[in-house]
Image (tube, rainbow, N blue to C red):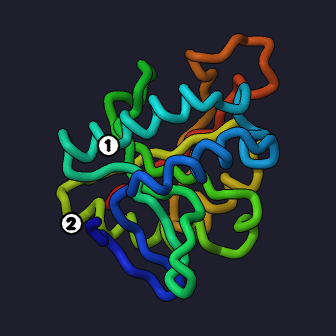
Amino acid sequence: MMIYIETERLILRSWKPEDLPLFIAMNKDSRVMRYFPATLSDAETEAFYNRIQNEFDSKGWGLYAVEIKSTGEFIGYVGLHEIGFDADFTPGVEIGWRLAADYHNQGYATEAAKAVLSLAKSVGIERLFSFTAKINAPSERVMQKIGMVKAGEFRHPNLSDDSPLCVHELYKIDL
């Protein structure tokens, strides 16, 4: 296991096989996935887990597993991801997060994301984007707290126009 970043309360590290069952449960939780089109099946989460591993192998960075330093408990991910769709701001790298519902509203996403900004700069990334459905105010607040600025709105190309999640807020930061 590799530790990439330690913050006051968190460790951002490589993923371990024992994270997968917790990640599967997290992605099935409607509270966690309320701003996504659907919860994920076991197979969908396993495929996502494998994509995360592949991105680390090819890029040397990715979506870091987050654990609470005092307990060692896996609580989700915060990290970097190559944007996987075409838009006027791609190609690019996004900073993103997903934490288990029991750990929302405790400042963990903000704490970890601030640390990831420093790491991104150290590996030569010059600009990061972040985006979320317009109705996802909690995630947008994290973007603001870590110093990102609103760059506009866009219709997510992987969502239908009639989806309440279609319109996304786009934020960016230059490192």
Vertical comparison of 56 with 143: above or below: above
Q: Mark 1 points at which residue?
A: 53
Residue toward you, 108 or 21:
21
Tell me which residue sits at (64%, 28%) in the image: 41
Q: Is mark 2 on a helix, strand or loop?
A: helix
Q: Earlier in the sequence, mark 1 or mark 2?
A: 1
Tell me which residue sits at (56%, 57%) in the image: 76
- Residue 38 pos. (x, y %): 73, 27
Q: How many discs mark residues in the rendered view?
A: 2
Vertical comparison of 124 with 11: above or below: above
Residue 15 quadrant: bottom left
Vertical comparison of 152 with 145: above or below: above
Select label 1 or label 2 by which is in front.
1
Q: Is residue 158 left or right of residue 36?
A: left
Disc 2 crowd, CA 10 A, few/some/many (<14, 14-19, 20+): few
Residue toward you, 106 or 28:
28
Disc 1 crowd, CA 10 A, few/some/many (<14, 14-19, 20+): some
Q: What element carries label 1?
A: helix
Q: Is residue 136 left or right of residue 7?
A: right
Q: Mark 2 points at which residue?
A: 122
Residue 11 quadrant: bottom left
Q: Which mark, residue 66?
A: none
- Residue 80 pos. (x, y %): 38, 50
- Residue 146 pos. (x, y %): 53, 67
Tell me which residue sits at (55%, 53%) in the image: 97
Tell me which residue sits at (46%, 49%) in the image: 172
Residue toward you, 51 or 167:
51
- Residue 95 pos. (x, y %): 45, 51
Separation (CA) of disc 1 from disc 2: 21 Å
Quadrant into which the N terminus falls: bottom left
Q: Which amino acid does label 2 sit on?
A: Ser
Q: What residue type is labelled 1?
A: Gln
